[in-house]
Image (tube, rainbow, N blue to C red):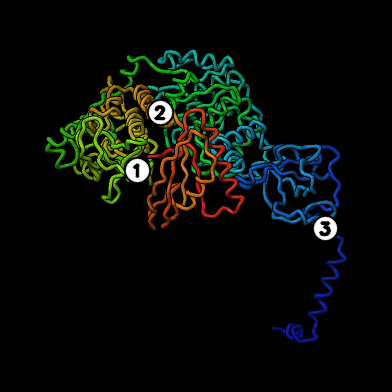
Amino acid sequence: MSRNDERSEEPGGGAPEQLALIRETVRKANVPKAKPRTWRGAPLAKELPVARVMVNKGVLHLDQYFDYAVTEELDAVAQPGVRVRVRFGAGAHNVREGRREGGGMIDGFLIERRAESDYAGPLAALAYVVSAEPVLSPELLALSRAIADRYAGSLADVLQLAVPPRNGPAEAKPSPEPLPPPDAPAAGTWERYAYGPAFLRELAAGGAPRAVWNALPGPHWPDELARAVAATLASGRGALVVLPDGRSAARVDAALTALVGKGHHTLLTADAGPQKRYRQWLAARRGSVRAVIGTRAAMFAPVTDLGLVAVWDDGDSSHSDDHAPFPHVREVLELRAQHSRCGFLLGAVSCTVEAAQLVESKWAVPLRAARDQVRAAAPLIRTVGDEEVARDGAARAARLPSLAWQTVRDGLRTGPVLVQVPRRGYVPSLACERCRTPARCRHCAGPLEAADQRELHCGWCGRDAAGWRCGECGSVRLRAQVVGARRTAEELGRAFPAVPVRTSGRDHVLESVPGVPALVVSTPGAEPVAEGGYAAALLLDGWAMLGRPDLRAGEEALRRWTSASALVRGQGEGGTVVVVAEPSLRPVQALVRWDPVGHAQRELAERAELGFPPVSRMAAVSGRPEAIAAFLAAAELPGDAEVLGPVPLRVTEPGRPRRPGDPPVGEVWERALLRVPPGSGAALAASLKAAQAARLARGGGDPVRIRIDPPDIG
């Protein structure tokens, strides 16, 4: 340390004089002061000086627009659809020079400009416009409002899903000029469907056909989906395709690129980083590209002049959003088709009950192939039931029936063999010991449970079910469905040591495998595509999926089986599938006949008779017991609403995986199901939304979760 430094620290040294000199210099400097975000005294815009803003507050009692003053300086950039920052939460007493001040800064969207406000008090001014890019169009706003009302949610929450976060560098970069429309494509493999070519012609002519497409098994569906998009582009309109995962989206992306070339469409998936994703989203909003292919978040993509919306495999759980208000892709695209008066295409190898309902209600027409085409494309399906497994010495010793062993040996001579094993978490339910009919409640037809070996009760309404008797065979004995082999990969690896064993599952999902002999063990939904198709497939532990305590257990099992079997070569090429499940069960018989549409139609008829969704509308309300009781007592439900429950939910244990919607760790929650007949769904959603808004306005208390059309109701 120098002597000067030592002197500067002594009392009366040079430090105070130096600090005073610095302050005086700063005061005298001609530095422009930042304008206060309250814009106190700033003149207002001469025309339309009021901005109606949707603030980013995802709470129901604030699900409304708020008015702000527009200053003259912000007049040019404060246009409808732009992002803004405003001060929110200031009291009416905090007013200076006619402007409300105070509150915290919050994001929002400018909805419209008005000449005057409905609010009689003083207005706060817009703090500033974040960007002049109008990201919220009137069409997207109307769609978001419809989704919020349908799912008893707030508009702010829907806009969080619909509009991606801003990225400055991506926004500053201009989008390329749009390419001219391509020529209408040839029908290609759409010729295999009775009305396939006509569907493409109507799209190319500017029509708006609505269809439910039951795709044939095999590798052609990405190209067929791409041809539907190309036909729409040929009419000068835009198209949107939503798929359940990045792998399937990449296949359609490659097919469309091969068909019309690059520059006509963009790919929106979670794999892209924030900057790239926002740049692709802007390209669609600005009209640089007319088609968007993507995963769930792309359901709100701002495609210009929309001519077709399409969803692939609508039964996949990935299509149901995990964030409030939990919209489903299929429902969002149905609303988009109605609002935009555009074409609609729901495609899958299987068929959901909701898809069957769209056809039965005449809202959409079916696109199916003739039975001879189905037989030519589908593999041979063989079954192994419990009785055969019990008599099979090889199955008892190695957990795999002899038929399955032989199918693997034969398949490995010509190519890879797929082995589908249910993942952990497929917990079986109770069923009749004699005929395996699922045990259901006599009152509401909910699934019966006997947690921890206690008394039998309903998992929906909670009523006691003592004295249960099977309605099919009269038996009074129940059994819990048993999960099959757990060491399938190890057993197969030891049985075929010269063949490589590949695995595809939750931790590591393979996109594709070469068409050489190999064993590919996969969980449902993670099956990789094999070059040239699989020679054979084994669908193991069928009871693990069929016996789940879920209304959709049979439908979901059939969907998983058909999706895996569709990757196998056709019967004419020697493709064989072995399913280990009771052959007499309806989903197994539908797989053997390759008739998912017939299965969905029968399921729909039964649900209509019992009052199950989708014929009825349901809502799940969950929370602490006292909160649920108070909420249901305060809610003004429709007169035809039926309350099932509440029943206790399973307590989430520390260290265990927590799914979306599960109670907080260690807390005791209950769930009530509210059921209404057709036509009362909107009234149910409105009443629940009003009750939740009133509750939050009073201070809330313990949380209460509302989910309209829950995907898992038992």
Residue 358 seen in the current view = yes
Q: Nearer the viewer, mark 2 or mark 3?
A: 2
Query: Would you say 180 lies left or right of 343 here?
Result: right
* Residue 424 sits above or below residue 234 on the image: below
Quarter of image, res 530: top left
Residue 318 seen in the current view = no
Question: How far is mark 1 from mark 2, CA to CA?
Answer: 30 Å
Q: Quadrant location of the N terminus?
A: bottom right
Say which amino acid is labelled 3.
Lys
* Residue 464 sits above or below residue 96 on the image: above
Quarter of image, res 273: top right
Say which amino acid is labelled 2.
Thr
Residue highlighted by disc 2: 352
For label 3, the SS is loop
Circle 1 residues within 10 Å: few <14, some 14–19, many ≥20? many
Residue highlighted by disc 1: 463
Residue highlighted by disc 3: 33
Q: Quadrant location of the C terminus?
A: top left
Question: How far is mark 2 from mark 3, CA to CA?
Answer: 63 Å
At 49% from the left and 38% from the top, the residue drawn is 708
Camera-nearest residue between 657 and 502: 657
At 83% from the left and 75% from the top, the residue drawn is 20
Mark 1–mark 2 contact, CB under 8 Å?
Answer: no
At 84% from the left and 57% from the top, the residue drawn is 32
Q: Position of residue 338 (x, y in %)?
A: 57, 25
